Image (cartoon, rainbow, N blue to C red):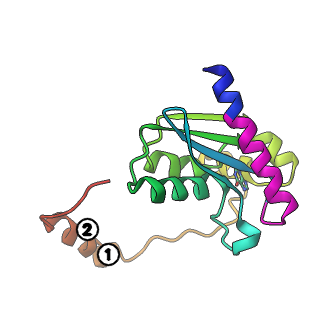
Amino acid sequence: MKNEHLHFLQLAVEEAKKGVLSNDGGPFGAAIVRRGELIALAHNEVLKTNDPTAHAEVVAIRRASAILGRFDLSDCVLYATCEPCPMCLAASYWAKIKTLVYACSRHDAARAGFDDAFIYEVLEGKAEDKRMEVLQMGREMALSAFELWQQKGDKTLY
Ligand SMILES: Nc1nc2[nH]cnc2c(=O)[nH]1
């Protein structure tokens, strides 16, 4: 099992390097594996697509979900060359991933110039400057969308 984990991490690392050399994005790769079978391999595509959410893990989750035709990836393992940032970790929870295997840490990413560790600090209430103004207003108005959802009989929960 450990060798299998290292095998898929190695594939993700090679994919990350491919993305760096093609200028697609940062040095991050990810793989989604189901019962020992590689379903999707992806690298960071932020620069290629001008999509700030195109992190390797998100691209891999989107690709695997499209291939398997479902949003529930609970039978899949996510391999990532680096500890997922909070967005990618949340995406993994939304995809119901049960096993995550990663190599480098958020601190390795920070040393390479990526803000993963800072966002964790914000979420943990440890950041002095959150670098974002956050306002809440219009709750009564917006609750109507939740009411519509709650009344809907044929909804799919996810
Ligand atoms: N884990 C991870 N961290 C990042 N930080 C910036 N981009 C990425 C990415 O694609 N993956």
Q: Where is residue 143 in the image (x, y as percent from the top left)?
A: 27, 71
Q: Residue 2, how many percent across, how many down?
A: 65, 20
| Looking at the image, residue 102 lies above or below residue 94 | above
- Disc number for residue 66: none
- Residue hosting label 2: 146
Which residue shows up at 67% across the image and 45% down it?
Answer: 126
Q: Nearer the viewer, residue 2 or 28?
A: 2
Question: In the image, what residue type sits under mark 2?
Answer: Phe
The answer to whether mark 1 and mark 2 are in CB contact below 8 A is: yes
* Residue 68 shown in magenta: no
Q: Quadrant of the N terminus?
A: top right
* In this view, 108 is above or below 62: above
Numbered disc in front, either 1 or 2: 2
Residue found 81% across the figure and 55% down from its top? 18
Q: Can residue 82 be seen in this view?
A: no
Q: Is residue 110 left or right of residue 86?
A: right
Most foreground residue, 86 or 39: 39
Q: Above or below — where is 106 with respect to 138?
A: above
| Distance from mark 1 CB to nearest ligand 1 atom below 8 Å | no
Check mark 2 vs ligand 1: CB closer than 8 Å? yes or no.
Answer: no
Q: Which amino acid does label 1 sit on?
A: Ala
Which circle marks residue 142 in the picture? 1
Q: Magenta segment, which residues?
A: 8-25
- Please name whichever residue, 76 or 26, is drawn nearer the observer in this view of the structure: 76
The secondary structure type at the circle numbered 2 is: helix
Circle 1 residues within 10 Å: few <14, some 14–19, many ≥20: few
Separation of disc 1 and disc 2 at Cα?
A: 8 Å
Q: Is residue 9 magenta?
A: yes
Q: In this view, does 134 lie above or below 56?
A: below
The residue positioned 44% from the left and 50% from the top of the image is 94
Q: Callout 1: helix, strand or loop?
A: helix
